[in-house]
Image (cartoon, grey):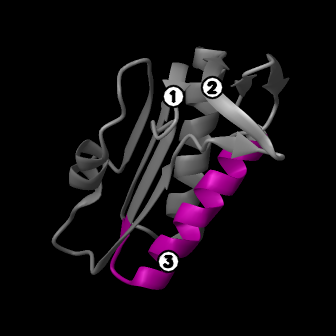
Amino acid sequence: MNTTSIKITSEKLNLQECYDFVADPSCGGIAVFVGTVRNATQNKEVTQLDFSTYKPMAIKEMQKIADAALEKFGVTKIAIHHAEGLLTIGDIPVIITVSSPHRKAAFEACQYAIDTLKETVPIWKKEFFEDGEVWVNAHP
């Protein structure tokens, strides 16, 4: 059984695809994290974001996170999908879904995955403002 779905794409992320991947008759809970592009950061109005990645390494790191979540929390399946390229307000740069027989493990694994992704995966974000732009080394 395939227990992980890892993807980095310039296409629009699909929440239903992530949900369908983790849905399983043995699971009583699915936890979902959807990161969205917000319209402001540090009191500055954001117009758009540009995500760049070193894809081979990013995919490898995302797989490590998924494998660790499966082992550490005993969850059944996990999907981690991240967008690359230009995104505007309301767009979705990251989706994580996790299924587990019990909800607590699904929540914990989902939080672990997004927190670890922000720390370890080589994806960079450029924020665009009315008066310029800035590279940010953190995730949404």
The answer to whether marks 2 and 1 mark residues whose Cβ atoms lie closer than 8 Å is yes
Lower sequence index among marks 3 and 2: 2
Residue on which the image places disc 1: 88
Alpha-carbon span between mark 3 and mark 2? 32 Å
How many C-alpha atoms fall within 10 Å of the one at disc 2: few (<14), some, or many (≥20)?
A: many
Question: As rendered, which of 74 and 11 lies closer to the eye?
Answer: 11
Question: As rendered, which of 118 and 131 lies closer to the eye?
Answer: 131
Inspect this view and state whether residue 84 appears. Answer: no
Q: Callout 2: helix, strand or loop?
A: strand
Q: Is residue 82 above or below residue 50?
A: below
Q: Callout 1: helix, strand or loop?
A: strand
Mark carried by residue 49:
2
Mark in the foreground, 3 or 2: 2
Residue 48: quarter of image:
top right
Residue on which the image places disc 3: 105
Residue 76 location (% of width, % of height): 36, 65
Question: As rendered, which of 128 and 11 lies closer to the eye?
Answer: 128
Q: Is residue 49 above or below residue 54?
A: below
Lower sequence index among marks 1 and 3: 1
Q: Which residues are magenta?
A: 99-119
The disc labelled 3 sits on which kind of residue? Answer: Ala
How many C-alpha atoms fall within 10 Å of the one at disc 3: few (<14), some, or many (≥20)?
A: many
Mark in the foreground, 1 or 3: 1
How many C-alpha atoms fall within 10 Å of the one at disc 1: few (<14), some, or many (≥20)?
A: some
* Residue 97 placement, left or right of 128: left
Alpha-carbon span between mark 1 and mark 3? 33 Å
Residue 67 location (% of width, % of height): 53, 50
The disc labelled 1 sits on which kind of residue? Answer: Thr
